């Protein structure tokens, strides 16, 4: 499984640098063009921050993957990892917010890094 994850990460890095229409195409755009085929029937953990949106719709990748049509096709988000301020940008650094919580719109467990405990993730 780790080999698949490493392969997917390397693929996203390489494909993310391909130019499309004179601009760099983001990894989430590449995944969407491939109909998230690399994520079908896999338990998926997404690591993202507030900028993890599709540039054409401004929909966050986690909200996109959580839509019913992708869930029916077998995309399963089991966890969300996020940097210091959470993937929606709604967490405050060093203000006592818990390191793990449930994201209300998706119902998914979310772990975000806390500068007081950076090794938590």
Image (cartoon, rainbow, N blue to C red):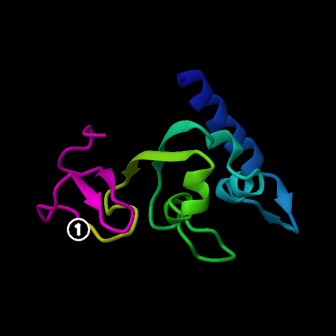
| Residue 47 x, y percent position in the rendering | 46, 49
Question: Is residue 110 shown in magenta?
Answer: yes
Question: Is residue 31 shown in magenta?
Answer: no
| Label tally | 1
Residue that sits furthest to the front in the current view: 72
| Residue 36 x, y percent position in the rendering | 68, 49
Residue at (55, 57) in percent of width and height: 65
Residue that sits furthest to the right in the current view: 21
The magenta span reads 92-121
Towards the viewer: 32 or 51 = 32
Towards the viewer: 46 or 41 = 41
Please state if 107 lies on the left or on the right of 95 as rendered.
right
SS at mark 1?
A: loop
The residue labelled by disc 1 is: 92
Residue at (69, 76) in percent of width and height: 56
SS assignment for the magenta stretch, majority: loop
């Amino acid at each position: 499984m780790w080999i698949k994850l490493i392969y997917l990460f390397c693929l996203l890095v390489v494909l993310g640098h391909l130019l499309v229409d004179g601009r760099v195409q983001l990894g989430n755009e590449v995944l969407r063009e491939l109909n998230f085929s690399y994520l079908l029937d896999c338990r998926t953990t997404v690591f993202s921050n507030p900028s993890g949106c599709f540039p054409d719709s401004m929909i966050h990748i986690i909200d996109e993957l959580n839509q019913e049509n992708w869930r029916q096709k077998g995309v399963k988000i089991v966890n969300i990892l996020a940097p210091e301020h959470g993937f929606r940008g709604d967490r405050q650094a060093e203000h006592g917010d818990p390191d793990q919580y449930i994201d209300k719109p998706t119902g998914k467990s979310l772990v975000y890094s806390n500068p007081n405990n950076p090794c938590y993730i």
